[in-house]
Image (tube, coloured by chain):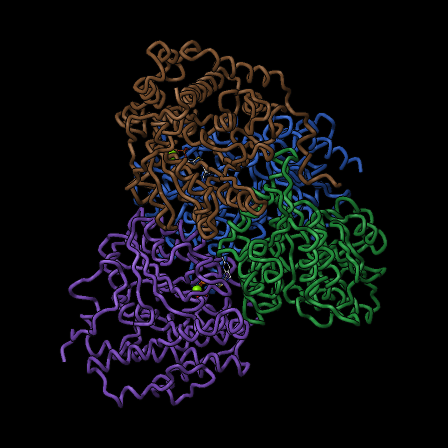
Chain colours: A brown, B purple, C blue, D green
Amino acid sequence: MSRTSGTAPAANATQKGDTPSIRPRDLLSKEDCLEIFRQLYLARYFDVRLIKEKRLGHLTGTLYSSHNQEGVLVGSLYGLKPNDWISPIHRDMPAFFLKDIKFDWRRADRMGLSIEEVCAQVWGRVGSPGRARDNWSHIGSRSKRIIHSTSMLAGTIPVAAGVVYADRLDGGDAVCVTFNGEGSTAQGIFHEAINYAAVHKLPVVTVVENNQWAYGTPAELECPTTDVADRARGFGIPGLVADGQDVFDVYDKVMTAINYARSGRGPSIVECKTFRAYGHGDHDDDRANKYRPKEDVEKGRARDPIAICRATLLALGHIDAAHAETFRAEGKNASEAKNDDFPPEVVTFLNEGIEFALQSSLPPADEGAKWVFREAK
Amino acid sequence: MSRTSGTAPAANATQKGDTPSIRPRDLLSKEDCLEIFRQLYLARYFDVRLIKEKRLGHLTGTLYSSHNQEGVLVGSLYGLKPNDWISPIHRDMPAFFLKDIKFDWRRADRMGLSIEEVCAQVWGRVGSPGRARDNWSHIGSRSKRIIHSTSMLAGTIPVAAGVVYADRLDGGDAVCVTFNGEGSTAQGIFHEAINYAAVHKLPVVTVVENNQWAYGTPAELECPTTDVADRARGFGIPGLVADGQDVFDVYDKVMTAINYARSGRGPSIVECKTFRAYGHGDHDDDRANKYRPKEDVEKGRARDPIAICRATLLALGHIDAAHAETFRAEGKNASEAKNDDFPPEVVTFLNEGIEFALQSSLPPADEGAKWVFREAK
Amino acid sequence: MSLVVEHAAPVKKNYVTALKEALFEEMERNPNLICQGEDIGILGGAFGVTEGLQARYGASRVVDMPISEACIVGSAVGLALGGKTVMAEMQFIDFISCGFDQIVNMMATYHYRTAGEVNMPVVVRGPAGAYGGGALYHSQMNEAWFCNSPGLRVVCPSTPYDAKGLLKGALRDGNPCIFFEIKELYRKREIAEFLPEEDYAIPLGKAIVRREGSDLTFVTYGQNVYHCLQAAVELEKLGVNAEVIDIRTLVPLDEDTIFTSIAKTNHLIAVNEAPMTCGFAGEIVARVSEKAFEYLDAPPMRITRLDTPVPWAKPLELHVLPSVEKLVNAALKSVKF
Amino acid sequence: MSLVVEHAAPVKKNYVTALKEALFEEMERNPNLICQGEDIGILGGAFGVTEGLQARYGASRVVDMPISEACIVGSAVGLALGGKTVMAEMQFIDFISCGFDQIVNMMATYHYRTAGEVNMPVVVRGPAGAYGGGALYHSQMNEAWFCNSPGLRVVCPSTPYDAKGLLKGALRDGNPCIFFEIKELYRKREIAEFLPEEDYAIPLGKAIVRREGSDLTFVTYGQNVYHCLQAAVELEKLGVNAEVIDIRTLVPLDEDTIFTSIAKTNHLIAVNEAPMTCGFAGEIVARVSEKAFEYLDAPPMRITRLDTPVPWAKPLELHVLPSVEKLVNAALKSVKF
Ligand SMILES: Cc1ncc(C[n+]2csc(CCOP(=O)(O)OP(=O)(O)O)c2C)c(N)n1
Ligand SMILES: Cc1ncc(C[n+]2csc(CCOP(=O)(O)OP(=O)(O)O)c2C)c(N)n1
Ligand SMILES: [Mg+2]
Ligand SMILES: [Mg+2]
């Protein structure tokens, strides 16, 4: 099988007027497609498992589920080069280990965090890259080119712009992909940073995960246009819309934006339409059942990105029915999904991460007073 | 002569696809047109006179000249209803007394500041509405419906949105016109406020005075699109472009936006293309001669808004050649223009204002400690 | 009148219920009161402080705002300019930094700049405070920024009674106010209490002595009131009799209550959860040192967070924050001076 | 090496020239140094601090930024994450409020959050201070906000020598720094001075005794250094011998120099231009009261701005700010205690 076998059926392209003859996905090999499928499992299992662990009382902090939004993460990350930067936010926890994870998840020179580091972070242990000083998604790594976020939504977009500016000065061609919810696009810093990036044609791709809700506020109270991607029009930059449930459509659109950015033409926005599966955080699950109409939730969850990917792979002949059955968690909530609904390699991978976390200690108390300033040289 | 005699020649309409059969200007009477002409004189004379006074050492604080931009101010303000709000900024000093000034400049019930109040402000005297507690354009009046600015550019746009929200709750139909430079549109709060106004369809009209420079920074380093009005596209709201040197084109576009806002359809942006005549402030005049190419400045100043208005009125037969000669300051810098280059009523009006200011004292020192908080009831 | 509870027999109310009652009652009383913030309407607020408010008063008076803190403040200023009273919620007080300019430069100064023409009855309130594992961005006590920005009232209630009374007081005060709610106290059962049936508002600027004592005075507010009270119990066992003052309002500060106490105990320990440098405990030490110097028998002391952010992992968090143990040790040192 | 002056005979240099020299020399020395801000390139800065810098080092290292303070800071953080050192200019330090969140939550905490993996060598500098009729938004000294936000160096030079040396020190310190330049001193001829020919940098955290005295210590920084020196001259005539300490760096603070002085003079007057409540003068009073209590023979005092904004009209401005007269009166009161 050729390495560029293509992934048709035809793209469900919602970007106006965008019908390239060769889509980025057409350059993906069968192996790539299978890896993407596997990564969707991995992201889903990570989420399911964390929800379980949280319910068992093993975790503190709020869990912002990425369930149903895995297509956005995997599709956005898959085409990045190792030296590219990413800037994930609260709902993108799997992005930290999905970055540059292709095929050999344990490759030593990977430009992404290991599952061990990510688990240590979730469990609040000293083995996390930030030694458990800040919580959840507020990790990152300078050496692995992952920007550390604060809680302040959209606050890393200017950082992304700055970091690629620095890279460009050094002769690099790195792109930075930032992730933001649709609600976060209402922040002033979103505007300032994209404006700056557009003026200087900086290679920043802003992926907007439009999951229809920002906590308890529907998208139409955050954004006056139907497509959040239209915000791009204010800066004269491309605004693409992807079906966030179709990992290959996300891949097409984000890769288009990445190529555009890398070629020096500047930033763009890729809106991925998706739907938040649960409450805003796990503390919000019960309330979310009240403030969100049941039909909406059912409709929003009907198109499971893993199922859609599976269908694509089946149609392409990349997998057969038996393989397709490896994943049986489709449509299941965390409470319903069991370990053997997932491929064993995924479960093992995460188990190893958790094992590491559990063996990592809490940081010693006096580290609380350390690293306020750089130690004198 | 009918009160709706029209002001053709045909509009130099730069708004794409905007060719209404009846333009707002077509509803202006001859008297209105003459009044608009007179107001342009007034704004110009105010500026010229202040520059002279500053050079004589009579004033402290920086003077941000509105020379060459009078068409934007007069054209934007002329169609407002008395109860409408405005929010001028540093370069809009004349707006404070131009608001609701039609015909009888001394009408007691005017919803604008008197020339006396404005002069007291400029001279830093206790007779200013803010008792000289803050400087220059940072005045306003709750009762006259003028928002007080801070220095922080674009910072009053959310205030404008809030104040019309309040008005709407009270059953009013007031619109607020805010003024901002093109550079100021890079501020985050610009985005937050217009986004909010667009979501709630609030009647806020943002007039962008694109005078090509933000202090020493050219427009293309502030805004990635050629038309700043394109920022509107990010919010799905109208973005109109007016020839800021043609007061009637400004009037057409701003009235279109005002009518749109008043009818409940929400905010819009009207970009008025103009050119800053001098330096950013009077302290910058010399440097501006270095950082701005001479040809640009000549080109930018070639189209004097008063001359253009005069030509229009002559063509319409609203004035004859003799009347047209009343104004002889066209193209002249402050140092060249003399009092008798202006109509006497304009000079008298301002003289009275200055007279008042000079007789107004400095505020008593201990007022410095007053009004930090509201006095206990 | 409140939606929240219409009981035959009175029940003890927690801190969040007290706040809720204040809002319902003020919304009823003042038709010009508007509430706005992120997720306060449909959801009823991240912590439920505005639960049911939109259902009762409609979406035009209880507004779900975009995630735009600067605009939440700035439009509140506009509403006030238009004659309204505004409650503006920050989902966490930590996010107030995103609306900082509008607060310190637009809102705080409006009355001053206009020589009193324009009043700014805007209460910006939000959940604050550490000890809950919220880490750097869900634990802040950033009150000192606002104390150094003239024109703002700064309030921090520590009990349900005060939460309700001070929120009403703040909403009626007519000045802009930053209102720090202690989220760790929101649902704390131990501090639930009976609230008056009748309307009451606590005027800003009155401290309260939470515990009388003769040997030493703790001056504090918010969560540390409880730590000081606990420390006082420990100290009692060691023969030290500590007074605990809850200042409740930082600006304006009730100096009299503090000085009166110091005149009696001659020992001061000022406590805040915020970082030490330029924090409010330092302000208390400075005021006492300046104006009640002769009463002091020992150096005044501060117990505050170390000059660090609030870290996440529990051992780190505890290490940097004031604790009962730190308070007891400081008190012993002070009285033994 | 600097563009600015290549004289045969040495000349005295003013404050703004000193800053300019620091920037040229550091740009030359450190190819990874980037400067960004509004109007710093084509124009050379509102006050000319960066005059000629873009012509020499190009528009990619000296960047004219959009009017977006938050992005100016945020992108500086990104540059630092990418290995650069950054000078980010606020056109007036007053506008730092528009970038406040990026400063206190993104930049200040980055090193801390990452357990030291990421350094943040970013100096945010800008013209500050009152006394020039700049009114509310061109007069601020808002240093206390940053002193209460852990992770930031806070620096305020009062002389050309210090301006140059401290700016270099700050740019080499490796930590984020808020650098307060006193715009009223920029071109003040009386303070112009000879600067060393050779490279020098003043490490942060060292105070300097500007005048020795035995009766009383003024502790201050920035413009009030000169007011205190003038007051000392007046006081001399009245038989009071005042010491004047210029702390130069607020964070970290050189406590030793202060305590040593208080041990000698036993009288403290702390002075800042900012509002009183939670200002840095209060911090000095608190530190001295806590740690040098026994040395104090009189209540420590503060002379600060009243808790008001800085108003425009001269009589108002003078009324609310520290003045030589206020300092002299306070000193007399202190020594007569
Ligand atoms: C500046 C700021 N304001 C408010 C919040 C509180 N907050 C956290 S997540 C969230 C909703 C975000 O919605 P969206 O951007 O759509 O992302 P989603 O959670 O839906 O993925 C809010 C309001 C915050 N973190 N930062
Ligand atoms: C938030 C903020 N940043 C910076 C400044 C300093 N500043 C005052 S005017 C100005 C340029 C404004 O340009 P523009 O908006 O185009 O208005 P113009 O002066 O050209 O009318 C700048 C940078 C400010 N006042 N506020
Ligand atoms: Mg969302
Ligand atoms: Mg401009």
Q: Nearer the viewer, residue B286 or A19?
A: A19
Q: Is residue D157 visible?
A: yes
Q: Nearer the viewer, residue C65 or D206?
A: D206
Above-or-below relation of B121 to A110: below
How many marks the image carries: the answer is 0
Residue name at image x 47 percent, y 33 percent: A80
Above-or-below relation of B305 to C317: below
Q: Is residue C1 visible?
A: no
- In the picture provided, is A72 more to the left or to the right than D278? left
Above-or-below relation of A52 to C226: above
Residue name at image x 33 percent, y 62 percent: B85
- In the picture provided, is D203 more to the left or to the right than B355? right
Q: Quadrant of the C terminus of chain D?
A: bottom right
Q: Nearer the viewer, residue D109 or D137?
A: D109
The x, y position of residue B23, in whole percent, is 19, 66
**Which image quadrant is residue A229 in?**
top left
The x, y position of residue C235, in whole percent, is 70, 29
**Which image quadrant is residue D302 in?**
bottom right
Residue name at image x 49 percent, y 73 percent: B126
> Outermost residue, front direction?
A2
Q: Quadrant of the N terminus of chain D?
A: bottom right
The x, y position of residue C233, in whole percent, is 66, 27
Residue name at image x 41 percent, y 88 percent: B339
Q: Nearer the viewer, residue A196 or B77?
A: A196
**Which image quadrant is residue C231 in?**
top right
